[in-house]
Image (cartoon, grey):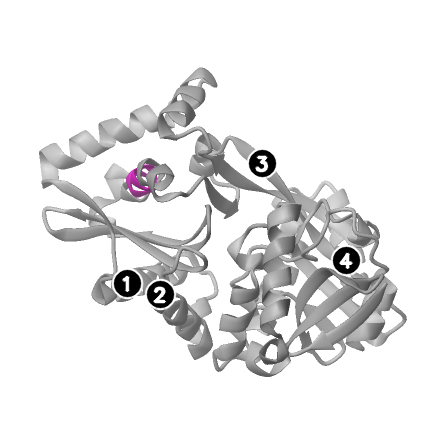
């Protein structure tokens, strides 16, 4: 297998067509694995403007895969981080990629993957742990999905319907919309920032490029690829908003926030349920709720998608440092320290997030 490395702006129309064809044939349809995601990230004045790279994979003169990365110093990672939920080679899941040669082509000592699709066997030796994304398959329509959830013993849809009726009795008519309202979009960002502050999480919008990326995607609302903005108004007042990414029939939940005045009615879940009702008629057959161990995600999802974290490296200071960090993390997680066992892992994730923002 041969590799060439190009900047996103050097990709040709033929590259984009080949990439989209590989997504379609390999089941890699996700906005975060789209060539358009790479191009939009690279066009924003953030780290990807200078650091985004695309590896083309060739075999027998034929393009067999693409691998987008952000290269900074001696380390590569996902383009768009920390805003990117998935990374991986776009190609057949069993594509025979030699990771050492991939690192050599990128001229780095280490590749970090916080969100690698776990079926990519070429990277298996670097996997340090697994999590799951929760996915809703709507390919048989909303009614069939709802019936299957009931049959599985999950009552979240019934509870959500009750909460909506209670909301309307007590507060006024609830109106769902696929929206282009920039004012509501800005309100959602403000709510999200307040949520980060209240929970002690890092505010990812403290740097300008992350909000600029959202705005660029909001402006691009095409079904082929772009942002999709949904709102729930109650008696004319914005109660919840959800900004998702779309690629063809796949919708990926991304940012959701609500007015705390309506919190007791779970307006965010009401809004998701309205999106699920809308989706099949607009050609959307999957809503990926992404990672995160939340009860509502587990209750709504009917498919689980394994996501791996870890790294691969070749002899270098960058690989040695990452290996040492994972050894400390593994040791702590193996000890009976209660909640303290998770602290090294949380510290690693937080440091990675802060580094990726800068």
In the rendered structure, which disc, 3 or 4, sits on the residue that comes first in sequence?
A: 3
- Picture coordinates of residue 28 (x, y %)? 61, 50
Q: Residue furthest right?
A: 315
- The quarter of the rendered structure image containing the N terminus is bottom right
In the rendered structure, which disc, 1 or 2, sits on the residue that comes first in sequence?
A: 1
Q: CA distance from mark 1 to mark 2?
A: 9 Å
Q: Where does label 3 land, which residue? A: 304
In the rendered structure, which disc, 2 or 3, sits on the residue that comes first in sequence?
A: 2
**Residue at left offset 39%, top offset 20%:** 147
Q: Where does label 2 land, which residue? A: 218
Q: Where does label 4 land, which residue? A: 326
Q: CA distance from mark 3 to mark 4?
A: 26 Å
Q: Which residues are magenta?
A: 269-275
Apparent side of residue 81 relative to residue 162 in the rendered image (left or right): right
Confirm or deny contact between disc 1 and disc 3 (CB under 8 A).
no
Q: CA distance from mark 2 to mark 3?
A: 28 Å
Q: CA distance from mark 2 to mark 4?
A: 37 Å
Confirm or deny contact between disc 2 and disc 3 (CB under 8 A).
no
Between 295 and 33, the one nearer to me in the picture: 33
């Amino acid at each position: 297998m041969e590799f060439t490395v190009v900047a996103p702006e050097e990709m040709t129309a033929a590259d984009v067509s080949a990439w989209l064809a590989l997504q379609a044939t390999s089941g890699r349809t996700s906005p975060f694995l789209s060539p358009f995601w790479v191009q939009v990230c690279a066009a924003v004045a953030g780290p990807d403007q200078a650091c985004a790279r695309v590896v083309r994979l060739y075999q027998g003169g034929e393009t067999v895969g693409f691998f987008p990365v952000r290269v900074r110093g001696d380390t590569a990672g996902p383009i768009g981080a920390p805003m990117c939920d998935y990374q991986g080679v776009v190609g057949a899941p069993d594509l025979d990629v030699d990771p050492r040669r991939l690192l050599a082509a990128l001229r780095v000592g280490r590749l970090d993957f916080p969100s690698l699709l776990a079926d990519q066997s070429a990277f298996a030796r670097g996997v340090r742990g697994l999590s799951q994304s929760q996915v809703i398959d709507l390919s048989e329509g909303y009614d069939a999905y709802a019936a299957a959830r009931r049959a599985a013993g999950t009552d979240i849809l019934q509870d959500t319907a009750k909460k909506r009726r209670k909301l309307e009795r007590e507060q006024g008519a609830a109106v769902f919309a696929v929206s282009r309202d920039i004012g509501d979009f800005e309100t959602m960002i403000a709510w999200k920032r307040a949520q980060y502050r209240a929970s002690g999480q890092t505010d990812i919008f403290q740097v300008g490029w992350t909000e600029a990326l959202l705005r660029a995607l909001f402006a691009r609302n095409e079904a082929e690829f772009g942002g999709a903005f949904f709102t729930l108004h109650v008696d004319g007042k914005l109660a919840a908003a959800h900004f998702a990414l779309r690629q063809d029939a796949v919708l990926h939940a991304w940012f959701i926030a609500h007015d705390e005045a309506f919190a007791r009615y779970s307006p965010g879940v009401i809004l998701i349920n309205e999106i699920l009702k809308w989706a099949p008629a607009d050609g959307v057959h999957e809503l990926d709720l992404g990672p995160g161990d939340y009860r509502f995600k587990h209750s709504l999802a009917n498919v689980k998608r394994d996501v791996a974290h870890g790294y691969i490296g070749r002899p270098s200071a960058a690989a040695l440092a990452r290996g040492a960090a994972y050894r400390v993390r593994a040791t702590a997680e193996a000890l009976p320290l209660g909640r303290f066992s998770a602290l090294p892992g949380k510290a690693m994730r937080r440091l990675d997030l802060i580094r990726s923002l800068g």
